[in-house]
Amino acid sequence: MSVPLIEVQQTPEALATSVAGELLSRLADAQSSGREPQIALTGGTIARAVHREIARLSAEFEVDWSRVVVWWGDERFVAPDDPDRNAAQAREDFLDAVGVDPAKVHEMPSTADADSLEAGAAAYGDVMRAQGAGEFEIVMLGVGPDGHVASLFPGHAALDVDDRIAVAVHDSPKPPSDRISLTFAALNRARTVWFLVSGQEKAGAVARALAATTPDLHDVPAVGVSGTEETVWFLDHEAASAL
């Protein structure tokens, strides 16, 4: 586990630009070192802002997007054309624009792909075992006001699942209630973990996660994920206001 680093920007816009530039730089560096980077994306307002900045800045960096593999940390188990799907938003915001190889974009199953949440989660685990690299270059995660990450919520049974890559979540407190999420066991197989957090409503969760005495992950799930080499909390001024 790496000691968390904290980077604070004044505004959500500055935060998005900073993270996008850092991601592009890291991908270029990984490729120049001979690696085909595998990344896990997240959803949410600040993630979408980051994704749009990636599209805007991409031409300034030497990233071969045909050699980047894309996964998701969690997804809503809804119809494939539902605009709330994280994958649909990422395609709209940057994936289609930068030229990622569609064969290397691994969306989590939708209701059209699997008969049940459990089947969908198992299928995603099978794909990751077959086509994953064994570790992510970078995992990007949002954090909820309750401290949840991906779709791992405080007090939920999914927090204790350690024998699967992905897990079914039936009772998400955020709609829609049915979701698929990577487990801690999968999320922690990452060289680098980045938390992307914006807004005053997240300040309490950030403060609890970064407290001198680390809370129980059942209360603040965000503390259950860290990179093997680096963990960074990218915050705007409001999200950092309770530190």
Image (spheres, grey):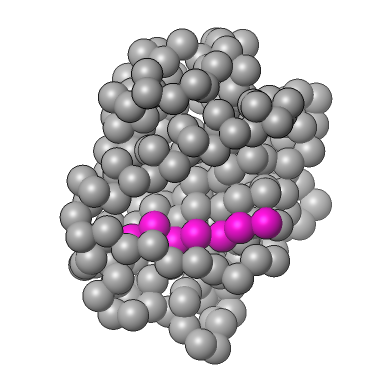
**173 to 69, vertically: above or below:** below
Q: Quadrant of the C terminus?
A: bottom left
The one nearer the camera, 54 or 92, is 54
Q: Residue at x 19, y 55 (%)?
A: 11
Q: Quadrant of the N terminus?
A: bottom right
Is 206 in the magenta?
Answer: no
Q: Residue at x 64, y 40 (%)?
A: 137
Q: Residue at x 56, y 45 (%)?
A: 139
Work out which residue is located at the far bottom of the displayed protein and give it.
Answer: 213
The one nearer the camera, 66 or 154, is 66
Segment colored magenta: 229-235
Q: Where's residue 132, x and y in %?
A: 74, 30
**213 to 114, vertically: above or below:** below
Total labels drawn: 0
Name the side, left or right, on which 146 lies relative to 128: left
Q: Where's residue 133, x and y in %?
A: 76, 32
Name the side, left or right, on which 99 lies relative to 175: right
Q: Residue at x 21, y 46 (%)?
A: 13
Magenta span dominant secondary structure: strand
Q: Where's residue 232, x and y in %?
A: 50, 59
Q: Where's residue 131, x and y in %?
A: 75, 24
The one nearer the camera, 37 or 170, is 37
Name the side, left or right, on which 25 lies relative to 173: right
Q: Is residue 237 visible?
A: yes
Q: Is residue 113 visible?
A: no
